[in-house]
Amino acid sequence: GAVVSQHPSRVICKSGTSVKIECRSLDFQATTMFWYRQFPKQSLMLMATSNEGSKATYEQGVEKDKFLINHASLTLSTLTVTSAHPEDSSFYICSASLAGGGTDTQYFGPGTRLTVL
Amino acid sequence: GNSVTQMEGPVTLSEEAFLTINCTYTATGYPSLFWYVQYPGEGLQLLLKATKADDKGSNKGFEATYRKETTSFHLEKGSVQVSDSAVYFCALSAGDYGGSQGNLIFGKGTKLSVKP
């Protein structure tokens, strides 16, 4: 089946540093990737949608200059949290959608736990 | 706006017990409804879905019926197994993929633990 990986699975960083999270579709090409954020005991919240080769579309309230998304190839999207602060600590989850697929063909990665000290 | 509310967990059951996880939604128009499951250490997986009123989604012994009159999509299984232990997420999509860019709105998740 379609597998999506994320790296790293956990990261701890100091306040003010930048952190990059990778999302890869391992056995399929993903024209669209989605980035979600999940706080403890809260829902997954869509942060942005990225299409290969174009700029990401950010949801209302998500700072695009803080959460940089790059989708340079059909199998890789990266999320960079710039100048991270403790309030950015969260669980970040990506998903990838098959080319031409609908909502139910999103395949999710296992998530990345970010802790900012 | 659109939202999903599901019962708080954790839910702990004995093997072969009956499972219900409640999910209600608020949406404009005619959303599609989903249940996703997340096993420990893995990503979310689509468990089942329903795209219109009175549709029943089913998979791996789980079922959920799209009830427009009660705006609900409760997840049920007649006899749970230890291997069903996971976190279950109810979700809705309020538009077609091309229009909403696949925007899924999730509930908070319900953790299920099944004891042997």
Image: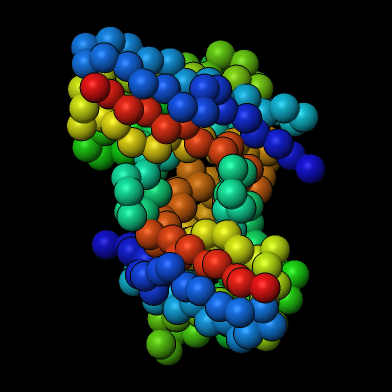
In percent of width and height, residue A114 lies at 37, 28
Is residue B72 toward the left or the right of residue B13 in the image? left
Quarter of the image for residue B49 reads: bottom right
Quadrant location of the C terminus of chain B in the rendered image? bottom right
**Nearer to the camera, B26 or A89:** A89
Q: Examine the rendered structure and indicate whether residue A83 appears above or below residue B51.
A: above
In percent of width and height, residue B40 lies at 59, 49
* Residue drawn where x is 63% and y is 56% of the image: B46
Is residue A109 toward the left or the right of residue A98 in the image? left
Quarter of the image for residue B62 reads: bottom right
Whether residue A50 is visible to the viewer of this picture, yes or no, is no
**Nearer to the camera, B33 or B10:** B10
Quadrant location of the N terminus of chain B in the rendered image? bottom left
In percent of width and height, residue B112 lies at 53, 67
Q: Examine the rendered structure and indicate whether residue B102 appears above or below residue B52.
A: above
Whether residue B7 is visible to the viewer of this picture, yes or no, is yes
* Residue drawn where x is 77% and y is 29% of the image: A27
